[in-house]
Image (cartoon, helix red, strand yellow):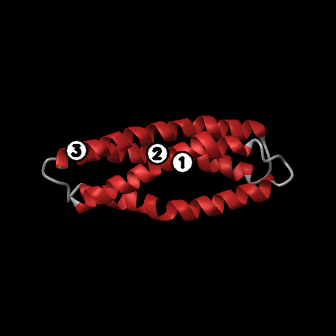
Amino acid sequence: MTILLLHAASTWFMVGLIWTIQLVHYPLFARVGADGFVTYEAEHTRRMGSVLAFPATAEVITGALLVWARPDSVPLSLVIGAGFLLFLIWLVTISVQVPHHVKLGEGFDLGRIEALVASNRWRAALWTLRGLGVGWMVALAI
């Protein structure tokens, strides 16, 4: 049960963070302007890495551990399904979001910022769906 609760805490931290990024942080990129944008993007990347390092790692590790150490009342299919959503989230992150950030690190580009916001909707939706699945796991376990 401890692993599941740690997993739920890290997952829901990430759900809250992705929606903060989607609704507040990424849209504000467009208001930074060209002059200080490269520095701003570099600082954003550095700070977000610090914020994400522990909960993102905990989410992956505890998610993997649940395959073998889940409460008996939690179906393996639910754990695998939530794990697949996490795989999709990281696939979108690596293949879409990271390239946007790399390009934005070269300079201000309003079209690229709009693409970053638009493509991040997928991550927000996937993490929300995942959070609901993990919440279901907790409900089944208690």
- Say which of 87 and 127 sits in front: 127
Dot 3 corresponds to which residue? 139
Q: Which one is nearer the viewer's eye here, 119 or 133?
A: 133
* C-alpha separation, residue under disc 1 versus residue under disc 3: 29 Å
Q: Which mark is residue 93?
A: 1
The nearer-to-camera label among 1 and 3 is 3
Residue 90 seen from this side: no
In the image, residue 75 lies at what x, y percent? Answer: 18, 44
* Labelled pair 1, 3 in contact (Cβ < 8 Å): no
Residue 120 position (above or below residue 102) = above
The three-letter amino acid code for the residue at tag 3 is Ala
Front position among marks 3 and 2: 3
Q: Is residue 103 left or right of residue 79?
A: right
The residue that appears at 75% across and 41% down in the rendered structure is 30
Mark 2 lies on a secondary structure that is helix
Q: Residue at x 50, y 40 (%)?
A: 124
Q: Amino acid at mark 2?
A: Ile
